[in-house]
Amino acid sequence: MNFGKVAVLLGGRSAEREISLKSGHAVLSALKRKGVDAHAFDPAFEDISGLKGFNRAFIALHGRYGEDGTIQGALELMNIPYTGSGVMASSLSMDKWRTKLVWAAANIPIAKYELLTADTDFDAVVQRLGLPIFVKPACEGSSIGISKVKHKEDLKNAFDLASEYDSLVIAEAFVEGREVQFPVLGEEVLPSIRIETPHDFYDFDAKYFAEDTKYICPGLPNEEEEGLKALILKSFRVLGCRGWARVDLILGKEGPCFLEMNTVPGMTDHSLVPMSAKKRGIEFDDLVMRILEESHVG
């Protein structure tokens, strides 16, 4: 398939810029090894009007302006096929609160949560959700701005940290269980990855730099994994996602608890989608090509 001139969108202006550069350069190298006429394009330093000279775009931008429907809308206007989910699904999935609203309406299990503001009665939130509580910016990824609050007097500080990254902040009840992530490629659910970390939780350092984080793939017994696939696909489809993504969930005593949908997952040497794809028999370069083949407009 002749893809023409392909822009690999990387870097960008979000708090996840550092990781996006790693993902983007890994994708760029893979495309070049496959003989694709691929070029790096960093919207933080290049005017997006320069994309008009490209035939396709591989989006490796994480976070704001890359994973939230913004760049997808620009590419739609320029009629340039791009990888991953469209404008609506990207925007919905980036917003953890609105993702929860859609999932709850579709009977996909989620953790108890509340929205926080500066006027919130934090003691009352602790009474309703219990401890520990995770406090998260609604529209950031890579665990940026997230705190695990174990003492009620720390909840306000966790809110202050999260609000540095987003005006919308979520307090989410802690669910004890196995942390598992499922990549989706096209309409196929790839093998799960179970995460074990000595860190207090799977934070930014544990995700990208720590050498003591353990990844078990497949992360679940085959029967349990097969039993979850229909729900994984439902969580993907109800948000309107397409192409590829990664679903994060906790398997607690009462069953699965869905946390978030990532529509532009990491593609670094620590990333989970390539790990899962390899277990499925798909090498990294072929994975990148499969994602590019699903590029679309509209």
Image (cartoon, rainbow, N blue to C red):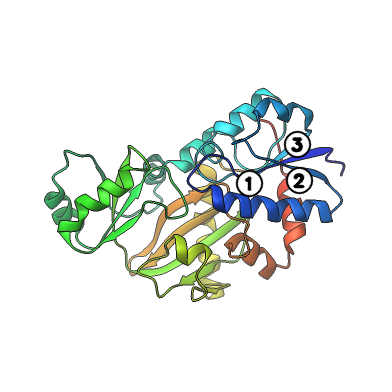
Dot 2 lies on which element?
Answer: helix
Residue drawn at point x = 79 percent, y = 44 percent: 38
Instruction: From this view, report whether residue 243 is shown above or below residue 46.
Output: below
Under tag 3, what secondary structure? Answer: strand
Observer-nearest of 105 and 177: 177
Question: Which residue was labeled with disc 3?
Answer: 56
Could you tell me the amino acid type at mark 2? Glu
* 115 or 255: nearer the viewer: 115
Quadrant of the image containing the C terminus: top right
Image quadrant holding the N terminus, namely top right
Residue 293 tag number:
2
Q: x, y percentage for residue 74?
A: 62, 27
Confirm whether residue 185 shows in the render. Answer: no
Locate residue 247, reporting x and y percent: 51, 55
Does the CB distance between marks 1 and 3 fall below 8 Å? no
Q: Quadrant of residue 5?
A: top right
